[in-house]
Image (spheres, grey):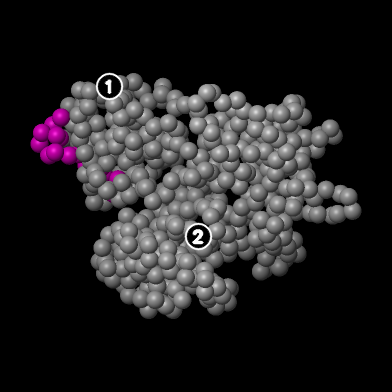
Amino acid sequence: MTHTEKPPRSANRLMVGGQVFDYLDLSKPSLAEPFQAAMEIAREKFGHALCLCRRQPLKLQLRLRMGKFHLAVWPNEGPHHDTECAFFRDDLWVNPNILPAERQDPARPAVQPTPAHPRVVASNTQKATQASTGAASAPAAPAEHVKPPRRQIMLAVPGQRDTEPRSPGAPVQRPLNLRALAMGLWEEAALCRWHTSWTRDWGRARYELQRVAGTLDLNGQPLDEMLFVPRPFREGAKEKLNNEWEEFVRRLGNRTRGTPLYLLIAPVRSFANPGNGSPAVMHLRHLRHPVGLSDASLDFIQKDCKTALRQVSTNLADIRAARQGDARADDPRNPEVIGFFLAEANSRGGVFARAAWLMNVHPRTFIPANSRNAVMLVDALIDRGYSFQRLQSDVQPMRRTSPDWLVRHVIGPDGKPMARAAIDMLDRGSSSEYLQSRHRLAQEMGKQGLPTWTWVPSGPFSNRTVPMLPPRDEMTPAEIQRALATIALSPDADFQYGPSPRFST
């Protein structure tokens, strides 16, 4: 799959003073004066502008500051915008692992976001900047000339002390571990989200990770110079891939003692732990050379990545069965496993991981998905035309204060349009303590006006399907009523403000 070249035009358009503008065109100097004139007319005649990102136009505030008009999100309507819209923001979730750039001085006009790819959505950094001012405007110069500062993040490297100098008075930043870094990068690269206009393959995921790396310094060094993500293997391009890997290994070998380790991210093909003094190794997709594991990294993934390790074994068994003609093998509902490695090279040119972490993802979109049920859920959401988000957390499941999944722009159980709803998957074998914790979470979400759709998968997996999801707000009234009635009669699903009375105890 590839990424769509252009999102729906409605996600880009504004109506200001009776005129329609394409948001991406506003970076053109020739439109600065006409756009300001339109905003003056809009303020005098209507008192607001309109964003056309959704079927129902959404109001935008018109603010005058330093002699220039600026557009701002209407109070409490940020989540109602399309997730591809530059005015979309949702305070329910903020990436806890990678901080946004320093917020802009409210006395200065906000810089209009310019996407680094065909999607219209602003980066987390740009959205955070807009959120601090509440405004967006057409700049006096092309936006592509404005380069935001690189964000500084610290990574705790096993066996290496923190030697990064700090300026006097600078706040002490808590170093991330590899798991937190991986989750933060995935969130920043939009690999935890989905929009109805997107498609994605490993090449696109690689591009997004490299794009984010270009905005970050890791332990004082540019992350894009320390990151290797293999391009998808193609027979006609294997020479280029092999050359890039050899260059990565060469840079690893030239790394001086005390400098940051390099980061390797790739899908895992197989895992082998032969013992007898031989190191454990990970074989990665797209690469012909394995990655060895240090004793510490092996011990960590065996204790903290058990689910992902089992999935690697399952996927390898499926591959072997498929080669033997087993029709049941190579199940597309199996998660893919992504490996994150802090890599170094030995004297013989081998690559070893001083630290490692594994993450289960959807095999075609790379959205984090821990189980086959989660893969089925992602497939259903995509096939049925939803925009949604996976909220990652390193907090234990029974202590989480945010849902695992959010689905956007749906109709609530009371028939009213909702900016988002929570999705919760429960195992029928879950402990009473876990169910009670999910009960409390749904209850808290209900107090905030956020309904929860609960799914309790049951029956043989071969016959399992995802029940009716919350109706989309673009459905007809008759379709909405049928969907809500179907959910109400479903033995495996419920849709409530607060916990489901059937599945919460």
Mark 2, Cα crowd under 10 Å, few <14 / some 14-19 / many 20+, is: few
- In front: label 2 or label 1: 2
Instruction: Give the labeled residue for mark 2.
Output: 399
Above or below for 83 versus 215 = below
Residue 1 forms part of the magenta stretch: no
Above or below for 139 versus 294 = above
- Residue 45 lies, in percent from the top left, at 10, 36
User: In percent of the image, x 53 and y 55: which residue is there?
Assistant: 395
User: In percent of the image, x 48 and y 54: which residue is there?
Assistant: 390
**Extreme residue toward the right, this view:** 276
User: In percent of the image, x 32 and y 59: which residue is there?
Assistant: 448
| Residue range corresponding to the magenta coloring | 40-54
Q: Is residue 328 left or right of residue 387?
A: right
- Residue 360 lies, in percent from the top left, at 60, 55
User: In percent of the image, x 43 and y 39: which residue is there?
Assistant: 124
Instruction: Give the labeled residue for mark 1.
Output: 30
